[in-house]
Image (cartoon, rainbow, N blue to C red):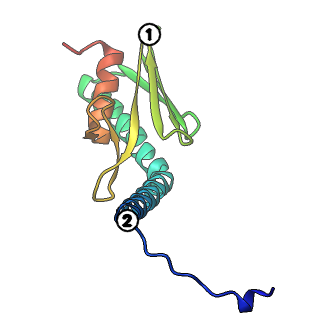
Amino acid sequence: MSWQNVRRIIVPMSEWSRKTSAKLKARASAQAIRDEKFVELQRLKRANGDAKWLEVREAVEAECSDLNADMGEQIVKFNMAPMDRLQVWKVGTDRTLHAEFHSDTHQLQWECGKRKGHWNLITTENGVVSFARVQEDAPIAAKEIAAQLLDILLETTV
């Protein structure tokens, strides 16, 4: 028997199958939208992460320069490390701040003495890429990150 000779028998769907089918289709559609949004947010992080890290590096370097100028002597020394890292020394001590941006995990990690922490790169609902406070998921500006890191290095936090 060839397929051309087979008649299609239409079986009416039950109420349950109609509702279940609609639910499953809606769920699949919503998941596809979430997946598409996730992929786009990750793309934005990859595209903008290095620039956000550069903003932090530049802010730390500027704050070091400003502090040294305000003090009239070199208090901190900024090291021009490879682009994915930075180091700042407190002159006359062994205190060193190390920070590094991991583009694969979208994370800025830092360490100073026995303290360490990180900021995650996030994409806000309106598509803005920013570092964020870990527990709050709230955007934080590069200058604020720089101030916090240098306060930790200089032990000037209250």
Q: Position of residue 68 (x, y in %)?
A: 32, 26
Q: Say which residue appears at 18% left-offset and 12% top-offset.
A: 158
| Outermost bottom residue | 4
Which type of secondary structure does the marked residue at label 1 adopt?
A: loop
What residue did someone put label 1 on? 113
Which quadrant does the N terminus fall into? bottom right
Q: Position of residue 8 (x, y in %)?
A: 60, 84
Q: Is residue 42 above or below residue 18?
A: above
Q: Nearer the viewer, residue 102 or 79?
A: 102
Q: Is residue 54 above or below residue 13?
A: above
| Outermost right residue | 1
> Which disc number belongs to residue 22?
2
Q: Earlier in the sequence, mark 1 or mark 2?
A: 2
> Which disc number belongs to residue 131?
none
Q: Is residue 141 above or below residue 34?
A: above
Q: Position of residue 19 (x, y in %)?
A: 34, 63
Give the image quarter of residue 153. top left
Q: Nearer the viewer, residue 125 or 148?
A: 125
Which type of secondary structure does the marked residue at label 2 adopt?
A: helix
* Classed neighbour count for the residue bearing mark 1: other residues with Cα under 10 Å, few (<14), some (14–19), many (≥20): few
| Outermost left residue | 158
